[in-house]
Image: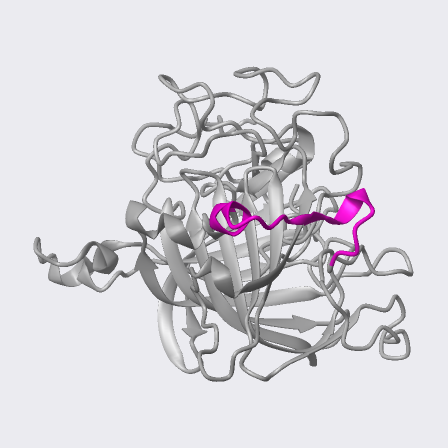
Amino acid sequence: ATTTSEQTGESSVMSGGPPPGVMAGAGGGGGGGGPPPGVTMGGGSAKGEEGDPAKCIIAPGAIGAAHQAGFSKGYSSSCPNSPAQESPYMWPMKWTAETHAQAMVFESDEVVYESKGRVFYMLDKNWKRSDVTYQVGALRALGTGDCEDSDTEELFQGGGCLKNQTDGTVSTMIHRGGQMYFIEWEKDETNPVKAGETDASKVARCDLINLAVVGNIRPDWFLDKRGDDTDVQYLGNQHVYYASDTPKLVKQWRKRDFASQYFTMSVMENPPNKLAKDPDAPTEDKMNWPLILNVPGEGLGDDQLYSYRNHELLTDDDEDLFTIIDRYEAMGNACVDIRAGGEGNGQGAPEGGHIPSNLEVDPLSWVSKEITFSPIWSAPVKNDAE
C-alpha cells in the first residue's frame, strides 16, 4: 500500500500519517520494539533476515507493498528470499538527495503546489529525514502541518493547506521506525538553520505521531509485488528529460497500490562510470540512482511528480542527522504526541471525500511483470499456452 506524501512524499503513508484503517497508537507495539498483536516475526509478509530476525520485516497487509514494518530494525540490500535481493536497481540503504516536487489536480497539468528540499535515508535502520526549504501553493495530503490559510475550499473542493514557505526557513520531518516527528526550528537571522541541521539547541518545538506498524519505505518497494492488493509492471528503458533539459536513459517500473492507482519509478540506467569502467571511480559514479518518481494522490491528495538531484551516499557518521530527537530530549525537552490531545502541527486528511487521480490503473495497458534484476532470484517462467 502506499499512501500520503511526506514532506517530500513518496506516497501518502510515505509521508504524513497512517493509511486508512491504521490507527496510530492503537493495537500496542507499533511504536515500541515489537510487533502488534496478530503479527508474528518471520511469518507471512513479515519475514525477518537470517541472523537478525528483527530486520527485513515488511509491514502487514497492503502497507507492506511499500513499507517496512514500524517495529523492523531496518532493511538490507540482501534480504533473504526477497524477489529483489541484491538488485542493483533498489534504492541505496544510506543516501541523500535534493528534492523537487510539483502537484497537479485531476484533469489538469497546472502546478498547484511546489516544494524543494533535501531528503536523507538510512533504510538499514528504518530511518528517514526530510528537510523542506521551500513550498508554495495548495497542498492536499495527510500530514500537511500548519496551514497558511485554512479556507482553501474555494480553490479546490476538499480543501487542503495553502503553503507559503519562501523565507528561507526549514521544515523538518524525521521518521524512525513507527514514530514520525515534526520539528519547528528557532528563528535566527544571524545564524539561520539550513537543511541537514544537527544542533538540537536550535529546535523550538517537536511534535510526534505514532504510526504503529507503518515504518519507512523499503528500498525495493517498486521492484516486487509483495504485500496485499498490489502489483508491479516492469516497463524497460526510455529516454526522459531530467533536471529541465538534460536527457537521461532510465529504467522504469510501475507499482499499483490499494487504491488501484500507480506510481512510476525512473532509475538511472547509465551511471557516469558505466562506459568508462574506471575501477577507481567513486561509488557514487557507479550507482543506479533514483531520478524521477510519479506519485498518485491515492484518493487523499493530488498527484505529484518528484525529482532527486545531487545524490550522495551517507555513512554511519551521519547518524546525528536522525538522532537530533534524542539530543533534544536529553536537554530536558519532550516531543508532543499530536494524537494524545496535544496542540500539534499535524493535519489530517483533507475534507470532501475521495480525490480523483490522473494515475488510475488502465486495464487496457496494465500487464503484471515482476522483473527485479536480482542476481539471486529468478522470475517464474510462464508457458506460451498460459
As drawn, 291 above or below 25 = below
Residue 114 % position (x, y): 62, 76
Instruction: Work out whether 58 lies above or below 188.
Output: above
Name the residue: 16% across, 62% down: 275
Left or right position of 17 against 191 = right
245 or 279, nearer to the observer: 279
| Left or right of residue 317: residue 128 | right
Q: Residue at x 62, y 47 (%)?
A: 180
39 in relation to 255, above or below: above
- Is residue 315 visible to the viewer in this orientation of the structure? no
Quarter where residue 60 is shown: top right
The quarter of the picture where the C terminus appears is top right
Bounds of the magenta segment: 326-344
Q: Is residue 365 above or below residue 249?
A: above
Residue 272 is situated, as x and y percent measured from the top left of the image, at: 22, 64
User: Residue shown at 69%/59% (left/top)?
Assistant: 359
Report whether residue 171 is seen. yes
| Quadrant showing the N terminus | top right
Residue 331 vs residue 261, the one in the foreground:
331
Q: Position of residue 188 (x, y in %)?
A: 52, 78
Say which residue appears at 45% left-offset and 72% top-offset.
194
Is 173 in the magenta? no
Quadrant in the picture for residue 139 = bottom right
Q: Is residue 13 left or right of residue 238?
A: right
Q: Where residue 383 sits: x, y (%)?
A: 48, 26
